[in-house]
Amino acid sequence: MEKFLSHTGTVLPFDRSNVDTDAILPKQYLKSISKFGFGDWLFDDLRYLDPGDVRTDTKTRRPNPDFVLNNPLYTDASILIARENFGCGSSREHAVWALKGYGIKAVIAPSFADIFYNNCFKNGVLPVVLPSDVVDKLFKLTAQHDAIQLTVDLENCKVSYGTEHSWSFTVDESRRQNLLQGHDEISITLLQKGAIQGFEDQLKTTEKWLFSN
């Protein structure tokens, strides 16, 4: 998994609360267990005027001109800000895959649904919890200026806008270290590969029946 140290990117203002995982990635796209290829379907029902499914070429569908993701200002957005309880609803990990596939590296909100929050860390997307009044200020900045950029600094646990505005956030230290080092659960397990192999070798001598055909 790619390391997350510090990222500066354009902010996508998604001014909604209680955004559920079906809004992030609708159910008709849950037919793949691959983590890749979901970016074109991010916020699909809001993003396109025509219905779609996995067999529909998104290039043939009419984009919704009123949806923020279709605003050219945010074509290269990589930091999403939203309101309370982002990622509620079903536990589908695909929702995070879609965000990551589009290029979103960090999501800032006053609160997140628990499972979605955990899935973010497993997939290298940083969820940042900031107080409601700070998030409100960020939305006001996006309304006052075109395509603002924020820096999300995981090493120092700070979000900053320019040199004059910065806000601290907290994150579980073990999760912070895993993102800084680019570790997911599989790579953490593989760090113990030697110990696992040693345990298996011991079992082969003491519990031979486990390895018989």
Image: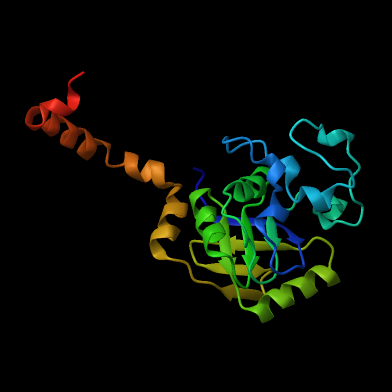
Horizontal side, residue 60 vs residue 161: left or right: right
Residue for point 17% across, 34% down: 198
Looking at the image, the residue that sits furthest to the bottom is 133
Q: Position of residue 3 (x, y in %)?
A: 50, 48
Location of the C terminus (image quadrant): top left
Viewer-closest of 13 and 141 = 13
Q: Quadrant of residue 197?
A: top left
Q: Position of residue 207 (x, y in %)?
A: 11, 31
Residue for point 90% across, 50% down: 64
Looking at the image, the residue that sits furthest to the left is 206
Q: Position of residue 86 (x, y in %)?
A: 64, 64
- Vertical position of residue 170 compared to residue 174: above or below: below
Viewer-closest of 176 and 53 = 53
- Vertical position of residue 77 compared to residue 138: above or below: above
Q: How many marks?
A: 0
Residue for point 73% across, 77% down: 137
Viewer-closest of 211 and 12 = 211
Q: Position of residue 169 (x, y in %)?
A: 53, 72
Q: Quadrant of residue 191?
A: top left
- Vertical position of residue 94 compared to residue 199: above or below: below
Is residue 174 visible to us here? yes
Is residue 5 visible to us here? no
Looking at the image, the residue that sits furthest to the top is 213
Horizontal side, residue 58 vs residue 66: left or right: left
